[in-house]
């Protein structure tokens, strides 16, 4: 079982590769060097939020926290690559053991390890939007009579995505966001049930599955949940204002043991407000 690392004392300036006080402003320095705790950093555009998060990672590594005990989450592949590159550049070396990437990339990595626990093989294939649409069209053709007024495959995909990412049922999603399709609620549910069955039988996932099945993995399997709660002693999240209900619960579950979460964001840019 993994050991828990504790920051007892801040290393002296002579031990550090980076002059944090010299390279950061007062507010950034306070955030970067704060004691382990839940920390919310709110600042406007262009104020150096991502820079602060990157220096926080470097600070923790320089305090002796092993890189595999850190989890760095962001929202785009470009941002993830840039952040990992900048951390490595600050400390002058590759950080292959550091877990960093988008929510979906980390979800895929964990699901490859534990695919059988959620009804998949580890070699599952990830579908893109067009693949998902084609599979939904097949399910609609099988489950819905031609004369029934039914949403397109694209709209059915949107309904499923909305339900998944807001943690609502299909019925609740239709009532709140797609009331015009409530008369065909049973048919929509039948199509989505068939879609889920076909995904498993074909060993394919869509992008929403990477988050929802990751969440199911943590909720339903105590040993897996405890393993990653112990491993990730520090969790850092960029652009936190963009998290949805699933991502928020994932962070809460992953951080439930150590509670060392630092999130940075700009609440005025929230897309889910």
Image (cartoon, helix red, strand yellow):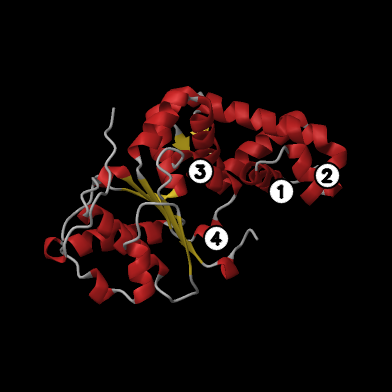
Mark 2 nearby-residue class (10 Å; few <14, some 14–19, many ≥20): some
Mark 4 nearby-residue class (10 Å; few <14, some 14–19, many ≥20): some
Tell me, yes or no, whether the two marked residues, 3 and 2, touch with CB atoms within 8 Å. Answer: no
Q: Position of residue 186 (x, y in %)?
A: 81, 32
Mark 1 nearby-residue class (10 Å; few <14, some 14–19, many ≥20): few
Q: Which residue is mark 3?
A: 252
User: On screen, 51 above or below 242?
Assistant: below
Per the model, the C-alpha gap separating discs 2 and 1 is 10 Å
Q: Which residue corresponds to the image point at 50% horizontal and 58% vertical from the top-left?
A: 240
- Report whether 157 appears left or right of 226: right
* Residue 155: numbered disc: 1
Q: Position of residue 250 (x, y in %)?
A: 51, 42
Q: Which residue is mark 2?
A: 181
Asked if residue 148 can be seen in this view, the reply is no
Disc on the earlier residue, 4 or 3: 4
Tell me, yes or no, whether the two marked residues, 3 and 1, touch with CB atoms within 8 Å. Answer: no
Q: Which residue is mark 4?
A: 241
Q: Position of residue 131 (x, y in %)?
A: 55, 42
Q: Nearer the viewer, mark 4 or mark 2?
A: 4
């Amino acid at each position: 079982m993994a050991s828990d690392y504790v920051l007892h004392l801040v290393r002296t300036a002579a031990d550090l590769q980076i002059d944090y006080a010299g390279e950061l402003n007062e507010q950034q320095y306070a955030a970067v060097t704060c004691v382990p705790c839940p920390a919310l950093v709110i600042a406007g555009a262009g104020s150096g939020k991502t820079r602060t998060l990157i220096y926080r990672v470097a600070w923790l590594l320089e305090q002796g926290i092993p890189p595999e005990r850190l989890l760095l989450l962001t929202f785009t592949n470009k941002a993830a690559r840039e952040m990992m590159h900048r951390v490595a550049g600050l400390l002058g070396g590759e950080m292959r053991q550091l877990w960093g990437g988008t929510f979906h990339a980390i979800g895929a990595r964990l699901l490859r390890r534990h695919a059988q626990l959620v009804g998949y093989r580890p070699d599952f294939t990830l579908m893109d939007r067009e693949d998902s649409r084609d599979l939904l069209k097949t399910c609609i053709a099988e489950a819905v009579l031609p004369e029934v007024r039914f949403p397109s495959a694209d709209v059915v995909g949107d309904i499923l995505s909305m339900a998944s990412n807001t943690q609502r049922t299909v019925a609740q999603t239709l009532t709140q966001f797609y009331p015009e399709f409530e008369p065909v609620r049973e048919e929509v549910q039948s199509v989505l049930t068939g879609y889920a069955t076909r995904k498993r039988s074909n060993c394919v996932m869509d992008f929403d599955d990477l988050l929802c099945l990751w969440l199911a993995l943590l909720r339903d399997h105590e040993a897996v949940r405890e393993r990653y709660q112990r491993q990730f002693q520090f969790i850092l999240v960029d652009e936190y204002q963009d998290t949805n209900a699933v991502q928020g619960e994932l962070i809460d579950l992953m951080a439930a043991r150590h509670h060392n979460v630092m999130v940075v964001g700009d609440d005025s840019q929230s897309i889910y407000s």
